[in-house]
Image: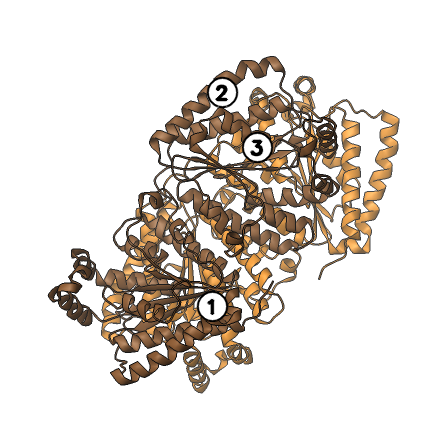
Chain colours: A brown, B orange
């Protein structure tokens, strides 16, 4: 693995000075092409051995390129904000938008590698983390990102020499800490763990570049030229349109499906409703005041047919909550800022802190519903979304997020009745648009999309609840009861860490 | 996950009889297109709940299609032959060639799922097995295979009813075993494990098709039409040529690399050589007679520059061995049969039984050496090969194969000397061809390929040994000594199972 980075690569001064000006100019040109085209982001990971030139390379990048279009992130200790969310949240929030270069010193590799070297986790969790990293980068790359991963390496003897040299020079002494020497003692262990991690995650789309860090001029030229050639190749040769056509996903031979099989006749009379509403809202309020609730958070997803009563369901929840505890996130068309990011980005940004609730009025499932049916993304895009969504939700649940997903189902007749009502009532008219009528024409396509969604994303840890919603009273109580029960289960579950 | 397959799908007799003839005819047409074009194989996995129609579907396939071009495999108990090899070996040997349909009842899913349900393994090993399955199928699909995965499902009540009905009928009573009822008691556990397994491995290229098995006519039509639509889509719409262009892999800025850094001056005089040869050959012979040797096997890979002495090195090993214990496998251009399979197939077939040695004169590394340099495969193909090879080798080593990989390195001058010698010596002239001279012209490209190969496939469990081979005596002794030491380490390692 590190064989090629321990053999004393060197570049002499004359060569370096001859090559550098042209390299820098070409790099700037490439960056300006990137900025003006603004059709993909560049993610640069800078990792490796202490003293091998990580920080120097980050500085270099900012010196060589226009730093106004570079975002540099030294990911150190977790903040309170970050500790309250799943580990990947801090990286999602810092992803560069299209046209920018995001540089990460410290990345999604750092923690699992450190934990493994310190013996805090075994080999299986390390492998699991690396598989997850590989899937994360595959997703980023499918979403258009260009990923460059640099690993600066020194041999064991080389690292010792380097740390000693830094310590000896009064100008750089501050850079060598006890932690560096402690890590040096663990050199062999680090080498073993890192070589496994790098090997498992070096893909054709996001290869690791291992750079020998002993000679500064060599290191700089490799870093600069790798950056240049990778940028240039991508700029000059945009990716082929999507992947090979996939085999069909589901074949139907009869008319039955889980939505048609759902009994929509359930009803609740007004007085029972009012009694139950009080009961469940009271219970929900108490649950959110439970001391143990500070240890979890709640994410609710509301999806359903147009006019199925999502808003009403959400208001019956918020009616029971302290306003400082929850946030309702209505999902409409993405903003410009959101469009410059992978599609999951705009949902990650709203993941609540511990002790809080986020209620999504429509959600990331748009990818496999409206975007699929309306052709807003390619088949390849929505088909890979099922496992991407499962990955995303698994991260939430592992971080003690209680994730509750509702599909509110109404019949075609009931929808027609409600549409007409909305059109006839002045203050409801804003709720009905030509889009709603258009969607209605594609009822069978949406139905198929919903069935596939439930089949492939109703997991043990994050099941879908199908709510018959022809009767609003019945639907609202089912929603409140389900939410309460899921929070109770969450409170009962023993905390892992 | 199984929601859509528990709602009582049904097809009435009239519909069935109206649809079937056309379906069968279209299926036969598709099969004949497949046979005449012979450019991809079809792999059909048939899994699911006992009594849900697995066997019936396999029979159906053979009735509907031309059975001469279908290979059906009921994977039951392991044979002695199979137990002696890594678990995937039995599946590799049964993969259908291009133009054929291979049907597997029982597959790479069966064992991990059973072991997990029986509590013999935890959740992490199950997930690991499923990740490996996903990578295996990705590789098959990258190699051109069309994969169809069927899962026949019954609800818990449905399965009970079905087993009782089968038991009641004297003609089918034999089909219900104690094992079926035992599995039925584990229904919930099975459902949980299987839904996780299916979800983790349902990709766009190889999606799972979950089929409700309660109604025979429904089940048959879904099975037939899924098969037809999948075949037809692939036949009518061949896959796009390779994937998006990948970023560059390694950038060089100086002339140094691990081969150039290798000290080729090591020599051994003739009398020392003869003494050492006797020592190490004797030791090797003893090692292969050790009782514990019956518990492992040895795979040696010989790669190196043309005329570096691979053959001579191999003969010094075989000279110390009982002829029944080893096999030398010279790798040249693949046969027709081999060309109809994924590239790793022809190496899997030669994996030795326990207690034996296989010596590969050139190997699977051809993919990242000659095939890369000569452009015999696409960049996408050789770049994915590094991790495919690491996966392959990990399976060998997990199965107690001692894997020893040699790169025999000589200088360009030494090679020239040997080429000329070969041309001048009558009985050596067959060893030198125009290809050898052509390869020699591409020395720098080959050198780069070798360095990348060593960097990305020299693993903790299967390291490369670089052998300076300008001096044949020295090289042969290093090979023998390395082999002995690796076998000794293998014998010392405690057996896991």
The picture places residue B252, in percent across and down from the top left corner, at: 57, 25
The C terminus of chain A lies in quadrant: bottom right
Please tell me which residue lies in front, B315 or B392: B392
Among the 4 quarters of the image, the one containing residue A370: bottom left
Question: Is the residue marked by circle 3 packed among few (<14), some (14-19), or many (20+) residues within 10 Å?
Answer: many
Marks 1/3 same chain: no
Q: Position of residue B456 (x, y in %)?
A: 60, 38
Q: Is residue B289 left or right of residue B222?
A: right
- Asked which secondary structure carries label 3, the reply is loop
Q: CA distance from mark 3 to mark 2?
A: 30 Å
Q: Report which quarter residue B54 is drawn in.
A: bottom left
Chain assignment, label 3: B
How busy is the neighbourhood of tag 2: few (under 14 within 10 Å), some, or many (20 plus)?
Answer: some
Q: Secondary structure at mark 1?
A: loop
Determine which residue is flagged by label 1.
A460
Q: Residue A439, position in %: x, y? A: 21, 59
Q: Is residue B72 visible?
A: no
- Please determine whether, in this image, residue A222 is positioned above or below residue A133: above
Residue beneath disc 3: B369
Give the number of the mark in front: 3 or 2: 2
Of the pair A335 and A203, the residue shown nearer to us: A335
* The N terminus of chain A sits in image quarter: top right
Question: Which labelled disc corresponds to residue A23?
Answer: 2
* Chain at tag 2: A
Residue found 73% across the figure and 35% down from its top: A156
Question: Numbered disc 1: what chain?
Answer: A
Where in the figure is residue A36, as x and y percent of width and height?
34, 29
Q: Nearer the viewer, mark 2 or mark 1?
A: 2
Label 2: which secondary element:
helix
Q: Nearer the viewer, residue A287 or B462?
A: A287
Q: Nearer the viewer, residue A348 or B68?
A: A348
Q: Are marks 1 and 3 in contact (CB under 8 Å)?
A: no
């Amino acid at each position: 693995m590190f064989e090629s980075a321990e053999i004393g690569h060197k570049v002499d001064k004359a060569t370096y000075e001859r090559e550098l000006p042209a390299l820098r100019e070409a790099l700037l040109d490439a960056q300006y092409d990137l900025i003006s085209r603004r059709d993909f982001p560049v993610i640069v990971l800078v990792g490796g051995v202490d003293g091998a030139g990580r920080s120097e390379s980050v500085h270099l990048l900012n010196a060589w390129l226009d730093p106004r279009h570079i975002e540099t992130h030294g990911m150190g200790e977790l903040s309170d904000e970050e500790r309250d969310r799943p580990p990947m949240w801090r990286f999602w929030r810092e992803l560069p938008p299209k046209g920018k270069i995001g540089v990460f010193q410290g990345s999604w590799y750092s923690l699992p590698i450190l934990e493994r070297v310190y013996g805090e986790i075994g080999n299986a969790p390390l492998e699991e983390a690396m598989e997850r990293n590989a899937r994360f980068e595959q997703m980023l790359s499918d979403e258009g990102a260009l990923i460059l991963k640099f690993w600066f390496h020194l041999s064991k003897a080389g690292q010792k020499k380097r740390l000693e040299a830094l310590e000896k020079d009064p100008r750089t002494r501050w850079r060598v800490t006890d932690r560096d020497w402690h890590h040096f003692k663990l050199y062999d262990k680090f080498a073993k763990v890192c070589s496994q991690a790098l090997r498992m995650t070096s893909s054709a789309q996001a290869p690791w570049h291992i750079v020998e860090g002993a000679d500064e001029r060599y290191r700089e030229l490799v870093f600069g030229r790798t950056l240049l050639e990778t940028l240039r190749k991508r700029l000059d040769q945009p990716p082929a349109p999507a992947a090979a056509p996939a085999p069909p996903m589901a074949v139907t031979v009869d008319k039955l499906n889980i939505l048609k099989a759902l009994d929509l006749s359930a009803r609740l009379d007004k007085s029972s409703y009012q009694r139950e509403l009080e009961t469940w809202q009271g219970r929900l309020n108490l649950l959110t005041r439970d001391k143990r609730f500070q240890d979890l958070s709640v994410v609710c997803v509301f999806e359903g047919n147009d006019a199925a009563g999502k808003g009403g369901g959400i208001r019956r929840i918020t009616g029971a909550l302290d306003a400082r505890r929850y946030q309702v996130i209505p999902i409409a068309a993405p903003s410009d800022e959101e469009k410059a990011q992978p599609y999951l980005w705009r949902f990650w940004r709203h993941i609540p802190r511990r002790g809080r609730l986020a209620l999504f009025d429509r959600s990331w499932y748009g990818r496999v519903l409206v975007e699929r049916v309306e052709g807003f993304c390619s088949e390849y895009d929505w088909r890979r979304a099922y496992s991407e969504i499962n990955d995303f939700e698994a991260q939430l649940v592992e971080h003690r997020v209680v994730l509750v997903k509702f599909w509110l189902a109404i019949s075609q007749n009931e929808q027609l009745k409600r549409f007409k009502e909305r059109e006839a009532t002045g203050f409801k008219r804003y709720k009905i648009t030509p889009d709603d009528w258009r969607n209605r024409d594609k009822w069978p396509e949406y139905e198929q999309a919903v069935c596939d969604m439930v089949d492939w994303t109703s997991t043990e840890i994050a099941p879908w609840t199908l709510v018959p919603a022809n009767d609003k009273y019945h639907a609202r109580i089912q929603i409140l009861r389900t939410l309460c029960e899921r929070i109770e289960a969450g409170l009962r579950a023993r905390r892992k860490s």
